[in-house]
Image (tube, helix red, strand yellow):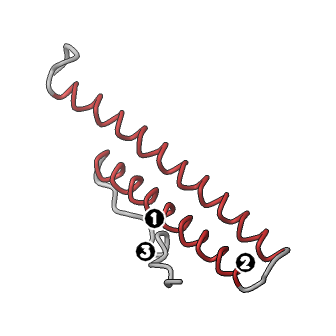
């Protein structure tokens, strides 16, 4: 089993200079949490392979569910930011009768 990568949250908050950087950050967080879900599954399998069961395995499974929920939330944020970017670009090009 490989060692997990860097903590996606440890670097601190990003510098958000606009919708594009915010959307990029949210998409990156979603991918990072997806990686953690995968690593958690590998960890759970390793525990089971070593005969561990009960509370430890249950806690890891619970963590995996919560981490997946976090990934899903970041995906929703990224999608919402992407929609706002599209609307802003449309206004900027005069496609909505403005600008």
Q: x and y percent of residue 78 in the render?
A: 41, 46
Q: Is residue 24 left or right of residue 78?
A: left
Q: Can you identify the residue that label 1 sits on? A: 32
| Quarter of the image where one finds residue 5 | bottom left
Q: Is residue 37 above or below residue 73?
A: below
Label 2 vs 1, first from the N-terminus: 1
Quadrant position of the C terminus in the picture: top left
Q: Is residue 99 above or below residue 82?
A: above
Q: Residue furthest top?
A: 97
Label 3 vs 1, first from the N-terminus: 3
| Quarter of the image where one finds residue 81 | top left
- Does dot 1 land on a helix, a strand or a loop? helix
Label 2 vs 3, first from the N-terminus: 3
Q: Can you identify the residue that label 3 sits on? A: 11
Identify which residue is drawn at 34% across, 62% down: 15
Q: CA distance from mark 2 to mark 3?
A: 32 Å
Q: Is residue 3 above or below residue 35?
A: below
Q: x and y percent of residue 92 in the render?
A: 18, 29
Q: x and y percent of residue 71 in the render?
A: 53, 55
- Does dot 3 land on a helix, a strand or a loop? loop
- The disc at residue 48 is 2
From the viewer's side, name the closer residue of 44 and 98. Answer: 44
Q: Is residue 70 left or right of residue 6?
A: right
């Amino acid at each position: 089993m490989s060692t997990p990568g860097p903590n996606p949250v440890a670097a601190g908050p990003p510098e958000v200079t606009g919708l594009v950087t915010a959307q990029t950050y949210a998409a990156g967080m979603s991918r990072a949490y997806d990686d953690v879900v995968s690593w958690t599954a590998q960890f759970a399998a390793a525990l089971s392979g070593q005969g561990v069961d009960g509370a430890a395995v249950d806690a890891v499974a619970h963590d995996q569910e919560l981490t997946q929920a976090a990934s899903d939330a970041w995906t929703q944020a990224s999608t919402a930011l992407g929609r706002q970017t599209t609307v802003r670009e449309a206004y900027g090009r005069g496609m909505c009768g403005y600008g």
